[in-house]
Image (cartoon, rainbow, N blue to C red):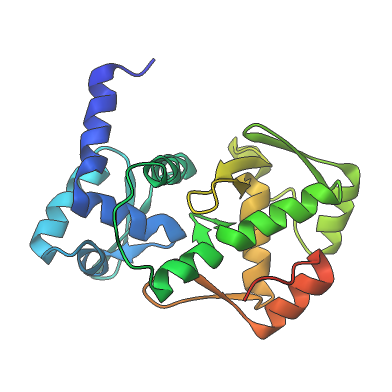
Amino acid sequence: MVSGNTLAEIAALIGDVARANILSALMDGRALTASELAWHSGVSPQTASGHLAKLSEANLLAVARQGRHRYYRLATPEVAQAIEALMAVASFGPKRHRPVGPKDEALRNARTCYDHLAGRLGIALADTLTARNHIVLSDSAGALTDGGHRFLCDFGIDLEAGRGRGRALCRTCLDWSERRPHLAGRLGAALCTRLFELGWVERIKDSRALAITPAGRKGLGETFGISEQS
């Protein structure tokens, strides 16, 4: 059982604006340098280094060295799940006036949530797979049907990848922008990876938003019956 003191310490770490921006910037699953994270958090490199040290000491971030650089990423999928859950809670909070810009719309349309897809695209994939009885969702869990297994294997997804690492094959993650569940777990990650491999989605610079390519619009329509994404 986690003590109240420990919970409060983690909450206080996340509660700082600069550190919250750092964690949010890493929600696309990639590893970034300290200077990149300083830019995302809006603080000086020296200040960012202090924040990164605290987050690393709390095991919220993992660090890898490559040459002269240190690369930071979220330590585990559970950290990403916690940040996404906080985003969902925040979306239900008091409304503050802020004009909606192109970046906001791009994030709501399609984005990465650590290593899986979120936004309208993520919701559409979950809806389609459910409607076709490829998956069965219940609360935060999900199950793959025999038909779904065949469909996804034919689509080029290796459902055995990462099986022995203790991560669930299929679970749901509450989408903060749509307020409905999208797919997470190994299946969600595999779907995301496959769409990148096929060139159906591509990253938008300096954002975890994704652009759906012309090939993606065609492929999503033909394979999943999804035609409303842009």
* On-image quarter of the N terminus: top left
Residue at horizontal 16 percent and vertical 58 percent from the top? 48
Residue at horizontal 74 percent and vertical 72 percent from the top? 227
How many numbered dots are placed on residues in this image? 0
Residue 168, image x, y percentages: 64, 37
The answer to whether residue 169 of the structure is visible from this angle is yes
Residue furthest to the bottom in view is 214
- Who is closer to the viewer here, 26 or 165? 26
Above/below status of 167 relative to 40? above
Residue 137, image x, y percentages: 73, 38
- Who is closer to the viewer here, 8 or 1? 8
* On-image quarter of the C terminus: bottom right
Image quadrant assignment for residue 205: bottom left
Image quadrant assignment for residue 200: bottom right
Residue at horizontal 55 percent and vertical 66 percent from the top? 109
Report the side of 11 relative to 151 (left or right).
left
Report the side of 8 relative to 181 (left or right).
left
The answer to whether residue 110 of the structure is visible from this angle is no
Residue 149, image x, y percentages: 84, 49
Residue 177, image x, y percentages: 49, 54
Above/below status of 220 relative to 165? below
